[in-house]
Amino acid sequence: MKRKTKVKLARLQRNTITVGRKLAGIILGSILLVISYEAFVLPYRLLSGGVSGLALIAHYTLPVPFYLGIFVLNLPIFIWGLLVLDRKLIVYSAVGAGMLIIMLPLLGPFIPRPHIDIFLAAIASGVVGGLGSGITFRQGASMGGTDIISLIMKKKRNISIGTTSFYCNILILALSLFFFDLKIAMYTAISMWVGSKVTDSVVSGINQNKYVTIISEHNTEIAERIMGEMHRGVTYLEGKGAFSGNSKMVINCVVNHFEIAKIKEIVAEIDKKAFVFVTETVEVMGKGFTF
């Protein structure tokens, strides 16, 4: 009985540490996004992609407080996401979006606004915002908005995450032409491009799916959790250790960039000695992925 209690306490401690690290990463990502908006986007009347871009247009034209626009636009998206997507992802993403909404009015007045060329501001906003988004994605979360819509479209229509994000950004740029000068749209496009490249670097190829190979003595338990919690297919391959000569089953599966953090978490909880390697895929065709 005491042993079971110790195991439960150890598991609770590991889960607490894991959740704490995720929340710390999400908060750091939110702070970086706030700095990007307050220091480089808002002072130069630039835009951004997705929901935040719509909130910025409303802020510049109506005007509506930027943080309020993010809240109002994200609310129905998160409700939709709760009905369709994994609830843990939605909860963590809601924390990220909530921290962004709270910290924008709180930290905004204290963030210095450097007087630089608008081109440099577009570059800086992309770099800092990309870092914030990348750190958040590494925690298996997002800031809501377009990211949630992209995941829903991927699940419902097999439309890739990158495709949905691209068209959402094109929509924002097209709308900006009705309200602002062409140069604002062009500088915003530069900021979006830089931000996407920085985000890709932080999370190691965010627009590509990942091929994961796992070698473990607990392959059955790991495979069951991947299928049960992540709803991803798993394939066993027969392997044999060259040194030991022992036969073993090798786990193979393909996941998207949001799921890498979860699959690492599952493996770490079951077998810390497991051998895992992740490779990028050029294209994936089949159920759950695009054709």
Image (cartoon, rainbow, N blue to C red):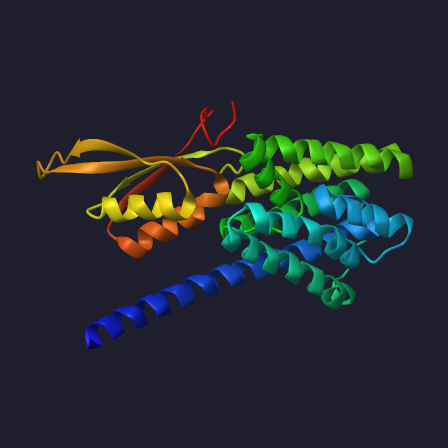
Q: Can residue 128 be seen at all in this image of the molecule?
A: no
**Residue 161 located left or right of residue 3:** right
**Residue 121 located left or right of residue 217:** right
Residue at the limit of the structure toward the left, as seen here: 245
Residue at the limit of the structure toward the front, as seen here: 83
How far across and how far down the image is residue 139, in percent? 50, 53
Q: Residue at x 62, y 43 (%)?
A: 147
Q: Residue at x 41, y 42 (%)?
A: 231
Instruction: State the residue in front, 32 or 255.
Output: 255
Q: Can residue 201 be seen at all in this image of the molecule?
A: yes
Total number of numbered labels? 0
Q: Residue at x 26, y 49 (%)?
A: 221
Is the residue 54 above or below the residue 110 in the image?
Answer: above
Q: Residue at x 33, y 36 (%)?
A: 234
Is the residue 8 above or below the residue 171 in the image?
Answer: below
Residue 173 quadrant: top right
Is the residue 118 above or below the residue 111 in the image?
Answer: above
Is the residue 180 above or below the residue 263 in the image?
Answer: above
How far across and how far down the image is residue 263, in percent? 39, 47
The image quadrant where one finds the N terminus is bottom left
**Residue 121 located left or right of residue 136:** right
How far across and how far down the image is residue 105, in percent? 76, 65
